[in-house]
Amino acid sequence: MRPVAFTVSAVIPPQEHPPRTAVRPRGRDHALTAVRTALARASNRGGTALAVRGESGSGKTTLLRWAAGTAAGADGRVLRVTGRPGAGAPAYAALRSLTAPLLRAPEALPPTVRSLLPDALRHHTDTGDETPVCSALWQTLAAVAGRRPLLLAVDDWQWLDPASARALAFLAHRLDGTRVLLLAAAEGPEPFPLTDCGVTELPLTALGDETARQVLSDRHPRLSADARTAVLAAAEGNPLALVSLPTGLTPEQRAGRAPLPDPLPPGAALERRLGRRFRALPAGTRALLAALALMDEDAEAGDVAWLADALGYGLDAFGPAEEAGLVSSGRVPRFVRRVHRCLAHATAPAAVRRRARHAWVELGLARLGGGRPGNGPAGRDEDGVARLEALGRAAVAARRWSTAVTAFRQAGELGPAPVERTRLHTAAASAAVCGGRPRLALALTREPAVGPAPATARALRAVRATTLFDVAFHAEESFRDLSAALDAGPVAGADVRDWAAFQLATLSPLTHRSAPARAALRALRPSAGATDPLRLAVTACLNPVARARDIREGLSVAAARALGTPDGDPHELTWLADAAWRIDDIGLSGRLLAAALRQSGTGEKRHLPHCWELRAELMTAEGRWEELRDLVARRTARSGAEGPGRHAVALKSRLLLVCAYQGRREEAGELADEIRRWARAHHSAHHARLAEYAALLLAQGGDAARTGGPGMPGGAARPSGADPCLDTVTRQAHAVLVRGALLRDDHEAARAHHQRAQRDGLARFSGEATLLVRHGRALLAAYADESDAAELFGLAEEAATVSARPFDRALLALDHGMWLRRRRELSAARTRLRAAYETFGRLGATPWQDRARTELRAIGAPPPGTARSATGAGTALSAHERRVVRLAASGLSNREIADRLLVSPRTVASHLYKVFPRLGISSRRELQGALLGGGDLL
């Protein structure tokens, strides 16, 4: 009877409830393919060994179970060996576990074979000779696999007793020609012993970001965005951690209705798998790890040494944890994985956690100067609350927001009185806002406030208003809440009212109403002078055009002071960068923004989302559109199922403009629909206006542009009226709006739009605005065929030399070149059109580049790059074809060429018909350019 063989596609037969061992590991396709291939080879007497390496929880055991289920489903036999942690295991302890299943094998093995391994193990006990054991193992497994293919799965190789490991390595050398597959799994950084035998190693690295998100969504689909982000960060792509961490959270925490604990609880599965490592450590090591779990990631070596001394242990106590692979052995001990931090805190006894917290508080007070250090042991909860609150206040003064959040939260959890709990959690929420964690701040303030004092109530209003502005924006509600949050008086925790005032001011550009910025201006401190960064930012939101001169003067002084300070306030830098952007000073805004982002390492985080918005604006203006795509992809990846927030929509709106510039109609349509819906739901006039502008760009750059007015691209939506003093989109789209009106032959609308810009002072506002206004005026003159059109285009080109916006410069060059072509000034037209063609090409603005190419071909000039491609094509022309091309380029007719070459005119026409596509041209007028670009080849 022919033996049953494994097959490559072998799987467990379909069942209503398939066995757990058949679970397919996610994100491990390379390993699954290798195991399938090895199983197929083993079925044809191509026995081999595979080594699987990965950290704990990486899916090694799941992979072994899947392989076992696959083998069993193909009627193969499976034997398992598992290493056990702990020293002192007798020799061949792992192999002895094989004797019972081998003796119970249903196949009728000869008695001499059945007794080989037990006899060899007894002989080794008497003599210590390992050779008989290794030989007996190989003979026994080869005999078992003679009738049915055999999978020998070895888990936790690193815990095998040395004698068993040597015997299995001996077996791995001698599997060729058998029907045995040895699949071994191990974890840890040490080299796998089997790799020295030429065995293939399958590394199970961390899952990629996208796969990790998918695994988490499949297993825990209802996690809130904040919980999902925290789990992904803590798991670092570890499959077991992705599955286990959410199970340690309460339903309220998973839904985002309660603040997440820090560190996250590991969950039952992760604690079962790794908890024993921590519980096996000495008491001193566990105490140090519990204290290390409370420290910031940027803790210094002196801080760790201080903690170790305060707990009564030396730094040597970290040694067992380093040997176990739980902490690094660098200058400053760090957890190797973030889940180790979770486990160190969760597995420590309550008394150890109290001692660690006490030491951490005293360290913070000693470092931040928040009070007299208390060297005694951890005492009553009331004393602990006072010390924690003192640490929180000191951390706020030092802008150590992570420390402040932890201290105030723990004080609130220890505080017995509900009023005190509300006050301390509000203080923690204010620090969370400053640390760039708005969702945590919102969760900390969600529980009902129990009779808050006036200072707590003021802080609570400010925290919730500034947090909801980012997390759940609505123009009307944000105006009401932020205005109410600016009441004067002391507050609990960090004061976030300055940031609330800035947010309130930014509502004016979003809603096209001056009331929010005026309210913010009234709430500013009376001592804030003309160079105060917040006052400058608020004024720039109110009316940047009318107050541009004052803003520029104050900005020059404030920016020089801020940039000259090595440790400048990141919030002030952000406010100044925003003010510079609103007055079109792109260079200064970029320098201030870079300085603000550099300061993000000091613990300040709340300014970062606005910084990313500003960076997206700068990238759009400067033509760095591929960088913008990367930025939007990175920053919007967290929006998830809860829908995009205000910051995500701001980034996507810039991407929408880029798609419109580049003619990506399908992508632009999807983005425009999303942004329009969001704008309607949240009452954002700015985003609605931006979607209109994108539609206008697509219309002017699309196929409809071929049927416009006299010499102009056509087909555009009718622009809506908006105040250019409040609406940045109207200012930046001035030339395109004038263009669109002229394309509809609506000269009056175009002139009215231009006159309003002139009346509001847009021509004197900035270099960029001057270019746009002069461009619009030149278009009006060209449309009406006025005598000063040439002079007006010249003035616009002069303004373009100082503009930082390449698309605006290229659009002017295109329009100027088209006007020159109509006036038969071909040389000047060629120069402008080629410049436009090249700039649009660098930007990827394909529709506009196509328009420039069409105009160039209309005057017989090949676009830049066409001549180079023609050069390559020219090498394929025959000598007779080259002669025809030269004569045709000189202006001769087909009959004249035929008379010179003694051929028929039809032959000349045939040659030119075949040559034109190869030269990349479409008419005789372009032959001269191809001849000049082709050099000697033509």
Image (tube, rainbow, N blue to C red):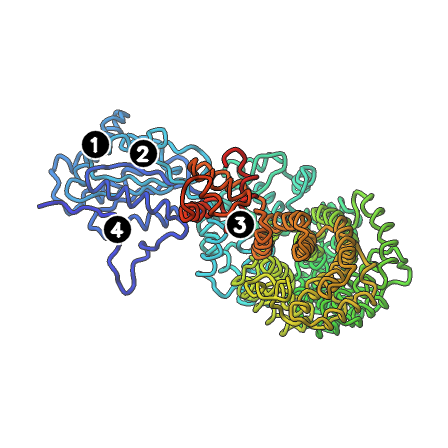
Return the disc, 2 or 1, that comes first in the chain's sequence.
1
Q: Amino acid at mark 2?
A: Ser
Return the disc, 1 or 3, that comes first in the chain's sequence.
1
- Front residue of 916/696: it is 916
The residue under label 2 is 164
Classify 10 Å Cα crowding around label 2: few (below 14), some (14-19), many (20 and above): many
Return the disc, 3 or 2, that comes first in the chain's sequence.
2
- Kindly identify which numbered label has been placed on residue 136: 1
Q: Amino acid at mark 3?
A: Leu
The answer to whether residue 651 is seen in the rendering is yes
Dot 4 falls on a residue whose secondary structure is: loop
User: Residue 224 at x, y = what percent?
Assistant: 55, 64
Q: Marks 3 and 2: CB-CB under 8 Å?
A: no
Return the disc, 4 or 2, that comes first in the chain's sequence.
4
Dot 1 falls on a residue whose secondary structure is: helix
Q: Is residue 273 left or right of residue 433?
A: left
Q: Amino acid at mark 4?
A: Ser
The residue under label 3 is 343
Q: Marks 4 and 3: CB-CB under 8 Å?
A: no
Q: Where, by quadrant of the figure, is residue 181 drawn?
A: top left
Rounded to the nearest angstrom, the CA distance separating label 3 from label 2 is 31 Å
- Front residue of 818/7: it is 818
- Residue sitting at 71 percent across and 71 percent down? 747
Rounded to the nearest angstrom, the CA distance separating label 1 from label 3 is 43 Å
Dot 3 falls on a residue whose secondary structure is: helix
Rounded to the nearest angstrom, the CA distance separating label 2 from label 1 is 13 Å
Classify 10 Å Cα crowding around label 1: few (below 14), some (14-19), many (20 and above): many
Q: Is residue 502 left or right of residue 1?
A: right
User: Residue 358 at x, y = what percent?
Assistant: 68, 50
Rounded to the nearest angstrom, the CA distance separating label 4 from label 2 is 32 Å
